[in-house]
Amino acid sequence: MDSLYADEILDHYKHPRNFGHLENPDIHVDANNPLCGDKLSMDIRVKDGKVADVSFSGRGCAISQAAASMLTERMLGASLEELAGTTRDDILEMLGIEVSYARMKCATLSLGLLRLALAEAGLSVSEHLEEE
C-alpha cells in the first residue's frame, strides 16, 4: 500500500470529516455489511437540488470509515444528479489503494448509502454494486 494513501486513510479514520448526525435531515439512510459488521448511517440536507449538508455515523474498519468520510467531502455542494454518476471506481480512486475482493464491500458501503439516498430523493441509479 502506498504510504501517502495509507496515511490519508488513517487520517480520515481517526479524524472523520462530516461525522455525526444532522437534525431534521431531508434524507436519512442506513446500511451495514453483515460480512464484517461495518454499519453506516448518512443524513443529507438538500437545497436547490444540491447537497447543502451531509453527515455520516457508524462503526467499522478503517477502509469503510475513511471511504465514508472522503465521500461526504465530495458530496458537499454537489448536485444529486452529479452524485448519481458516482461509481465504485470513483470510491477506489478516492481511497487510492488496491482493495481486495474481501474488502470491496467495506470500501463501497458508503456508495451503497449514497445510492439509497438518491433513490429516496426520487432519482434512479442504474448501476448496482453487485454488478460492479
Image (cartoon, grey):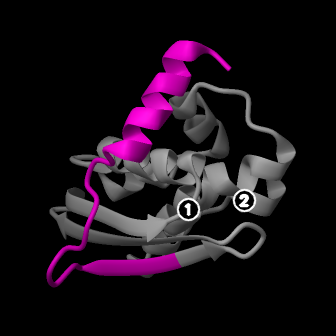
Q: Which residues are magenta?
A: 1-30
Picture quadrant where residue 88 is located: top right
Q: Amino acid at mark 1?
A: Gly
Q: Which mark is residue 60?
A: 1
Q: Residue at x 75, y 49 (%)?
A: 103
Specify whether residue 20 is painted magenta.
yes
Residue 34, labelled with which disc?
none
SS for tag 2?
helix
Q: Is residue 15 left or right of residue 93?
A: left
Examine the rendered structure and indicate whether residue 121 appears above or below residue 111. below
Residue at (24%, 57%) from the top-left corner?
Answer: 51
In front here: 48 or 112?
112
- In the rendered view, tell whether residue 69 sits above or below residue 119: above
Q: Nearer the viewer, residue 85 or 1?
A: 1
Q: Amino acid at mark 2?
A: Leu
Q: Secondary structure at mark 1?
A: loop
Residue 82 visible? The answer is no
Say which quarter of the image contains residue 124: bottom right
Crowding at mark 1 (Cα within 10 Å: few <14, some 14-19, many 20+): some
Q: Image quadrant for the N terminus? A: top right
